[in-house]
Amino acid sequence: MTEQAKINLKSIVSHANGFVAADMDGEKVMLNIEKGNYYGLDGIGSCIWELIEKPCTVQQVVSSLLQEYDVEEEQCQNEVLIFVRELHSQGLVVID
């Protein structure tokens, strides 16, 4: 099983070190200082980024989004897992 597949609702997610983030026109923009890579997150992506500023479970992120947005729980879970796995594959988050 790949490390990406191991990320589930009980996984604890938080920001990886080495990034500078700022708000720009409703989006989060991040710069990896070591690699010089630039990343941008839109509205909901920015919201998730703020939620994982402190370590929390993927389920806690889902619960917060369910309170904020009109979305089915299963769809929210699936999309958050996809998003967190992508952030992890880019080295933007750490999983415990």
Image (cartoon, helix red, strand yellow):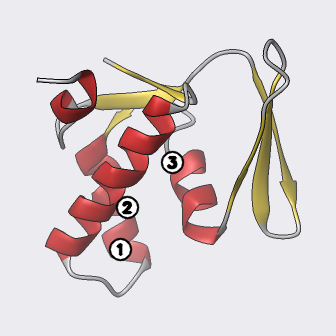
Image disc number at residue 67: 1
Q: Does residue 55 appear in the picture of this structure?
A: no
Instruction: Point out the residue furthest to the front here.
Output: 2
What residue is at 63 percent from the left and 57 percent from the top?
A: 46
The residue labelled by disc 3 is: 51
Whether label 3 touches label 2, CB < 8 Å? yes
Q: Does residue 45 appear in the picture of this structure?
A: yes
Residue 1 found in image quarter: top left
What residue is at 24 percent from the left and 31 percent from the top?
A: 11
Question: Which quadrant is the C terminus positioned in?
Answer: top left
Q: 79 or 47, which lies in front? A: 79
Q: Is residue 47 left or right of residue 13?
A: right
Q: Position of residue 17 (x, y in %)?
A: 65, 16
Instruction: Point out the residue furthest to the bottom here.
Output: 70
The residue labelled by disc 2 is: 64
Is residue 11 depicted above or below 9 in this figure? Answer: above
Mark 3 neighbour class, 10 Å CA radius: few under 14, some 14 to 19, many 20 or more: many
- Residue type at mark 1: give it: Gln
Q: 86 or 43, which lies in front? A: 86
What residue is at 39 percent from the left and 31 percent from the top?
A: 13
